[in-house]
Image (cartoon, helix red, strand yellow):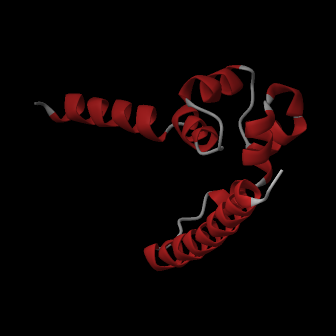
Amino acid sequence: MPRDKHCSLACQVQEVCGGEKAQTLELFGRVWGAGPATALRWYELGMRTLDDLRARQDLLNRHQEVGLRLFSDLDVRMDRRECTEILQQVKEVALKVMTETDSRFTERKEAPL
């Protein structure tokens, strides 16, 4: 492949993958509750930043409002150790609640009417 064609193709790939539209769609796609179609709609409506979305809350559903409000928290990867610790805590609480609920149900069932 001649150098100019290779450069042209590389420039096209860079434009598609690294251009403003691709970067904006990738950013909007990280908002919880927004998929590719929503990200594209926001882009076509002229939105380019999260601040643009914050200024147009009327474009968001409840899930997207939460996703935008908590974006910085939700966009951070949680390491496996922390995830495992949280899962263990949730299991312990769930087991406690299930045990208490089961014992209350059993007490009601055994109580004379």
Nearest to the observer: residue 79 or residue 27: 79
Q: Position of residue 96 (x, y in %)?
A: 64, 72
Q: Is residue 102 above or below residue 62?
A: below
Nearest to the observer: residue 27 or residue 60: 60
Most extreme residue toward the left is: 1
The answer to whether 26 appears left or right of 17 in the picture is right
Q: Residue at x 54, y 28 (%)?
A: 36
The total number of labels drawn is 0
Q: Position of residue 46 (x, y in %)?
A: 75, 25
Q: Residue at x 80, y 35 (%)?
A: 62
Q: Position of residue 20 (x, y in %)?
A: 58, 36
Residue 29 sits in quarter = top right
Most extreme residue toward the front is: 112
Q: Is residue 109 above or below residue 34?
A: below
Q: Is residue 66 above or below residue 94?
A: above
Q: Residue at x 36, y 30 (%)?
A: 12
Nearest to the observer: residue 17 or residue 105: 105
The answer to whether 16 appears left or right of 32 in the picture is left
Q: Position of residue 78 (x, y in %)?
A: 53, 69
The N terminus - image quarter: top left
The answer to whether 77 appears left or right of 41 in the picture is left
Residue 56 sits in quarter = top right
Q: Residue at x 55, y 70 (%)?
A: 91
